[in-house]
């Protein structure tokens, strides 16, 4: 019996803090040089991924400037760029968004980032506690959305005040480039229900993802709104299960117990993110608790914050696991793998066919995020993929 489900939209990741084949070591580390980031972006664009996520934080190259440069080097790729309420005014970010949307010819998506490390936020001049940041973000997005929609904005809130705000150059996408957002707290779910178009989750076990989706749907429905859903996780795909698990183990082979303990201590003490606590709780910092669901491996979360899980296996198995998430309502997968250039090819060549995604990303009956034609650049570079 044929699978009648619409193929998932596959996004990739631009490693603006650096890249490499191993975690916990500088061995074969690749710095975040723009030429390398451009190489990833043009390959991903050609392979048929729908978009890319650019991370944010003081350990990353600036997402807005990097995305602008990459937009001029690509044809179809969409750019999911961090929008951080509190670090600049809504009017400033509205002008930024409109300009990048025009430069990219309507390929901009915004990833609303409210949470994070309080110490890092303080370095950016943000001193609000967790729930207060979300209250401030709600005012910010209200102003931002009105400006992008072409309104002249007067607003007097608890945190922000605008008088006669106006945007002179409109975006391509109307009323505004779509807002994406991920957060697990009650305050985050309320913000998603009120303000955004796509709600994101990290790669948690099926029952936990189902609970988050149900909660977000219910809150949005109570406001007369609907949401789309996406997931951020890593993929380790090889021709056989055995080879995929060897690659997963190799990825953390140089991670010491001391490094794990230090990383987990920093995560516990340095973040007020509910989502991060959920990620950490999956494995508890223990190497013997890394299999947290069928083919769902939490080894990356031992030493990295944020998305800490990977689906590991052969193409058919990983595709089956992804379709289980799709059955819950997930439409977009924002994936990554180390190193990101070679793994973009591995995922496209091995997993895309199993998901019903053809050459160049063509999907029969799939929702097209952007009407532009696929790029036709040169073939695959002669690289030796990590195995």
Image (tube, grey):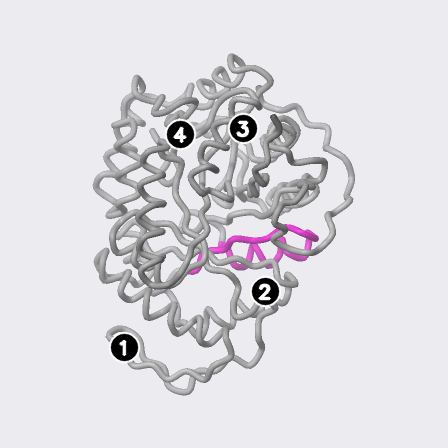
Q: Is residue 228 left or right of residue 78?
A: left
Residue 16's spot in the image, x, y percent?
51, 45
Give the mark nearest the N terminus, 3 or 1: 1
Residue 246's spot in the image, x, y percent?
49, 15
- Considering the numbered disc 4 on the image, is that residue within a helix, a strand or a loop? helix
Give the mark nearest the N terminus, 2 or 3: 2
Residue 276's spot in the image, x, y percent?
30, 41
Q: Residues within 10 Å of mark 4 (few under 14, many from 20)?
A: many
Residue 273 in the magenta stretch? The answer is no
Residue 69 in the magenta stretch? The answer is yes
Pointers 3 and 1 in contact (CB under 8 A)?
Answer: no
Q: Which mark is residue 300?
A: 4
**Alpha carbon distance from label 2 to label 1:** 28 Å
Can you identify the residue that label 2 sits on?
Answer: 101
Q: Nearer the viewer, mark 2 or mark 3?
A: 3
Q: Which mark is residue 319?
A: 3
Give the mark nearest the N terminus, 4 or 1: 1
Q: Quadrant of the N terminus?
A: top right
Can you identify the residue that label 1 sits on?
Answer: 157
**Alpha carbon distance from label 3 to label 1:** 47 Å
For the magenta stretch, what is the residue range?
Answer: 62-83
**Alpha carbon distance from label 2 to label 4:** 33 Å
Q: Residues within 10 Å of mark 2 (few under 14, many from 20)?
A: many
């Amino acid at each position: 019996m044929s699978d009648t489900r619409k193929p998932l939209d596959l996004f990739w990741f631009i490693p603006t803090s650096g890249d490499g084949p191993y975690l916990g070591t500088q061995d074969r580390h690749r710095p975040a040089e723009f030429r390398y980031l451009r190489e990833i972006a043009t390959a991903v664009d050609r392979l048929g991924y729908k978009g890319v996520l650019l991370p944010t934080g003081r350990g990353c190259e600036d997402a807005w400037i990097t995305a602008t440069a990459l937009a001029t080097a690509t044809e179809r790729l969409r750019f999911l760029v961090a929008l951080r309420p509190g670090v600049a005014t809504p009017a400033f970010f509205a002008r930024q968004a409109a300009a990048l949307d025009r430069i990219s010819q309507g390929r901009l998506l915004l990833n609303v980032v409210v949470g994070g490390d309080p110490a890092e936020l303080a370095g950016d001049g943000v001193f609000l506690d967790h729930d207060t940041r979300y209250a401030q973000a709600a005012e910010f997005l209200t102003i931002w959305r009105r400006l992008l929609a072409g309104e002249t904005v007067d607003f007097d809130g608890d945190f922000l005040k605008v008088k006669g705000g106006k945007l002179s150059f409109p975006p391509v996408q109307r009323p505004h480039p779509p807002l994406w957002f991920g957060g697990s707290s009650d305050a985050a779910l309320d913000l998603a229900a009120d303000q955004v178009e796509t709600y994101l989750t990290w790669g948690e076990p099926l029952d936990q993802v189902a609970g988050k989706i149900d909660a977000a749907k219910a809150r949005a429905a109570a406001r007369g709104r609907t949401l789309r859903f996406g997931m951020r996780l890593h993929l380790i795909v090889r021709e056989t299960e055995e080879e995929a698990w060897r690659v997963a183990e190799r990825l953390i082979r140089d991670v010491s117990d001391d490094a794990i303990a230090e990383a987990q201590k920093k995560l516990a003490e340095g973040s007020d993110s509910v989502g991060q606590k959920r990620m950490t709780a999956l494995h508890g910092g223990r190497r013997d608790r890394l299999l947290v669901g069928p083919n769902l491996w939490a080894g990356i979360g031992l030493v990295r914050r944020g998305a800490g899980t990977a689906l590991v296996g052969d193409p058919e198995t990983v595709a089956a696991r992804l379709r289980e998430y799709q059955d819950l309502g997930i439409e977009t997968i924002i994936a990554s793998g180390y190193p990101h250039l070679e793994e973009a090819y591995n995922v496209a060549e091995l997993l895309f066919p199993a998901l019903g995604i053809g050459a160049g990303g063509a999907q029969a009956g799939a929702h097209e995020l952007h009407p532009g034609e696929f790029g036709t650049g040169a073939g695959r570079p002669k690289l030796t993929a990590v195995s």
